[in-house]
Image (cartoon, rainbow, N blue to C red):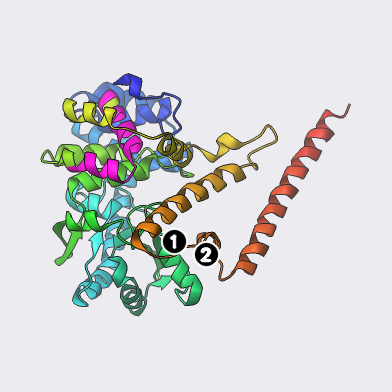
Amino acid sequence: MKDSIDSNSPWIPSPEDEMLLMAALAPEGKAHDVGLAWLANMNLATQGEATNRLLPLVHDRLVRDGIDHPAMAILKGVRRKVWCRNQLLFKHAAPAVQALRQAGIDVMILKGAALTLNYYQDYGLRPMGDFDMMVRFKDVAAAMEILSEKGWEANYLMEGKLGRNILIYTHAMHFKDSSGLTLDFHWHLLPFCVNRAADSAFWNASIAAKFDSVDVRVLNPAGQLLHVCVHGLMWSGIPGIRWIPDSLAILYKAPELDWNRLLLQAQEGNLTLFMRSALNYLVDRFGAPVPCDVLRAMNVLPVTSYEAREFTVHTERRSSYSTALGNHYSIPKALQVLFYTYRRIVADAKLCGYNVTVMEYLCAYYWKENVWRLFFYILYRIGGRVSRLMNRVIMVLVHQTP
């Protein structure tokens, strides 16, 4: 099992983050020593965003273990702040969800909202930056119009060729209301699985739920676990450690999880390495309740060299492509992400019988109306990178001059 985990993988939490995770997730009765050790080493004033996201869970665990510490008052305040913000997000999103349902549009609640409702069942435990939901691809235009009527403003107007390209080549768009709260509006579940039939299996296996007394859908436990793990292992600017408590919450709350479905979805979506890596890590570090036969089956699923390269590109830090002159040489990584995502789109387009072009894809990715705007934008970006690199070279040479 341990052989399946590369300790140098960029998605593996740092030792400091693992101590935080242990303080938040240790079994009841066993968190006392871990919690005290974490409290003795932490500095709340210098914690990053990734750490702050787990503080409500740490508070919950330490309270249940009866730990009394001066920092508990601060942790309690953080938890209350999360509770208030989540309540605001839910309250502001509720009229939009209700309007969509009244118009006959199916709504699936995703990510933090779904996890809060179905698994954490406490508004103060799982911080949310925005409210995520998804509609079927065919309903996107009607749904966006309703959101606009309810006071949610899209980042971009979905009009003309740009609007068409965004729909075809991307998976979601942010909306904001007058208070500044954000709604992440999806028409596809995953950012690199954007063909028109990509989410059919997730919709077909989704389960009914209630959101503010409105009938909605949520992913079934297998789909929820896959979504959490794939999204969590993908590289982002904030270290992705929140997927670990999210995954464990699903595993402990859903013992009826359909493992065969999870294996099938991982294989059909070419997501085997995401799930293999995540499950092995969860079992090895946290004793996650994953059946041994499931883990063995996951570990022997065939993986092509192409899929392995794609996994590396999506999970590797961009700074891994930096040079000794600084963190400005990240173009190769960005290009590889674009390449592998486009390859998926092309393959799916051939199967579904519609045409795609690389220029339309790049326009959609960079949110540009036409090729000329894209051209000048790329020139601007390249010029900025060259300028910063030259400034760094000059500074190095100046400092080396006797």
| Residue 395 figure quarter | top right
Q: Residue 349 is drawn in which quadrant?
A: bottom left
Q: State which tag comes first along the sequence, 1 or 2.
A: 1
Q: Which residues are magenta?
A: 261-284
**Dot 2 corresponds to which residue?**
360
Q: Residue at x 40, y 53 (%)?
A: 347
* Residue at the image point whose x is 51% and y is 49% from the top: 339
Report if the CB atoms under discs 1 and 2 are less than 8 Å apart: yes
The circle on residue 169 is 1
Residue 375 lies left or right of residue 390; in this view the side is left
- Which residue lies most toward the bottom here? 149
Please indicate, yes or no, whether residue 308 appears anywhere in the rendered image.
Answer: yes
> Residue type at mark 2?
Glu
For residue 90, side relative to residue 336 (left or right): left
In this view, the residue in front, 125 or 138, is 138
Task: Give the position of the N terminus as an image quadrant.
Answer: top left
Residue 275 marker: none
**Residue at 20% in and 28% down:** 27
Residue neighbourhood size for the residue with mark 1, other residues' Cα within 10 Å, grouped as few (<14), some (14–19), many (≥20): many
In what quadrant of the picture does the C terminus appear?
top right
Q: Is residue 5 left or right of residue 246?
A: right
Q: What whole-number distance in Å separates the C-alpha atoms at marks 1 and 2?
A: 8 Å
- Magenta-drawn stretch, dominant element (helix, strand or loop): helix
Q: Secondary structure at mark 1?
A: helix
